[in-house]
Amino acid sequence: MVEEVTRGEPGLRRSLKNRHLQMIALGGIIGASLFIGSGAVISTVGPAAIVSYAIGGLIVVLVMRMLGEMATAAPTLGSFMEYARTSLGEWAGFTLGWLYWYYWVGVVAFEAVAGAELINPLIPMVPQWVISLGLMLVLTGTNLVSVRSFGETEFWLASIKVITIVIFLVCGVLFVFGLWPGAEMSVSNIGKDGFFAHGGFSVLHGVVIVIFSYFGTEIVTIVSAESDEPERSVAKATKAVVWRVLLFYVGSVTLLVMITPWDQIPTEGSPYAAAFTRFGIPAAEVVVDVVVFTAVISVLNSGLYTASRMLFALQRRSFAPGWVRDLNGRGVPWKAIVLSTLVGYVAVAASYVAPDTIFYFIINSAGAVALFIYGMIALSQLRMRRRLEREAPETLKLKMWLFPHLTWVTLALIATVIITMAFVADVRSQLLLSLISVAAIMLIYVLFVRRKVSNG
């Protein structure tokens, strides 16, 4: 079973270096939703948004530790899709793989639209849909050139995000302790109107909102299949996820509610831009807008890569058309990239032609998918860990903490967030549409794939 998972990936080039993987892992957790969406979360929850980000981060840290355990024991293309397939059954691999592909295709379209909205004020004579398609074409080209081209692009995009957050953390600490020119100590802002200003349930509401901000951290386990040192790179990135979550998310949000009273933090625009303005940094909004655009392009770049590699992995198990396996001379699965991009083009077109129907369904039906994927990863790790302990204990170089207890805690946390979605009006439709997506994929497996896999 383990040998089957660890087979090589013929044709793909292992040309990503450790520095690429570490920066992808470092920057992958910093998305546009942190720079923009954190203001809405703080408005909804109050200062206790810090707890919401901490709980969401805890789920991600635990899931990444499980992924790290499996990926270092059996690095493979498709990562958790393969682990689900070998641990839970063919149906699980098919469902998880297509859910993940569907999620990222939707994200690619959403980020292309978001990027166009950011650029459009600078070139108002160009229609937004043209800008969206232009962004997708540029990033598709980057992905088609080579995996090294993708890695270099993502390295520099991630570097900009990381440098911005580090500057904010340093300036923010000096500001809240009154060490910044013209600043007074403002740590006490964290307790304004009480820490749980909107009650305890609002914290869970906040977790529902923020959990999707973290999604994308797991990309490093997929990228590792094309790196020169997959086991070492994944182990290093997985171990570092704890401090990344604490520093970049929990730390920066804590500073936001200390720098400015929480009820004065802007819900539209970026609260980070408002904070930089308070520091007296000139052109703060413009600088943050550039960083947000960088974050959007980074997600778009990663999304195209991730969707194509998952599609490539799916065809290896006859879960996708065989023709998507075709590679160009540089070892890039170009047909998988083009197909993923084409679906993204359709979604972008739908955002302008039918924003309240087709595009609404594509975006919202992926809303709870991240949680379903995390849940299947945890279930896979339960099975795979026990099998590895019996068959190949020497491969367990990076172990999940307090197994199996923390794995069950993770599953309980994920179930709690999913149940909470049913009671929060803003996201209830996302849960319903996501369940429809899961049911549709499983039905396709039962009707068209199960017999072929059984006979094959």
Image: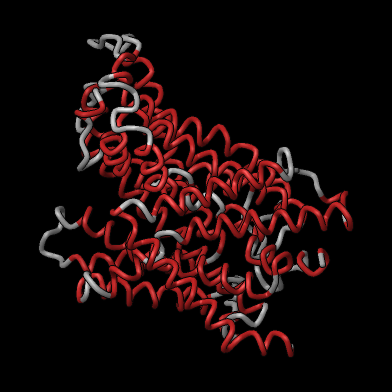
Provide residue 340's location: percent of width, then percent of height: 45, 74
- Which image quarter: residue 193? top left
Q: Which of 116 and 99 is in front in this view?
A: 99
Relative side of 393 to 359, left or right = right
Q: Which of 250 and 285 is in front in this view?
A: 250
What is the image's colouring?
secondary structure
At horizontal 66% and vertical 46% (from top left) the residue drawn is: 407
Compared to residue 88, the image places residue 279 above or below, namely above
Provide residue 325's location: percent of width, then percent of height: 60, 80
Compared to residue 194, the image places residue 39 above or below, namely below
Compared to residue 78, the image places residue 317 above or below, namely below
Quarter of the rendering occupied by the N terminus: bottom right
At horizontal 26% and vertical 9% (from top left) the residue drawn is: 184
Provide residue 248's location: percent of width, then percent of height: 45, 34
Q: What is the tally of numbered marks visible in this picture?
A: 0
At horizontal 45% and vertical 53% (from top left) the residue drawn is: 419
Quarter of the rendering occupied by the C terminus: bottom right
At horizontal 34% and vertical 38% (from top left) the residue drawn is: 202
Relative side of 334 to 62, left or right = left
Provide residue 224's location: percent of width, then percent of height: 64, 55
Residue farthest left in this picture: 125
- Which image quarter: residue 163? top left
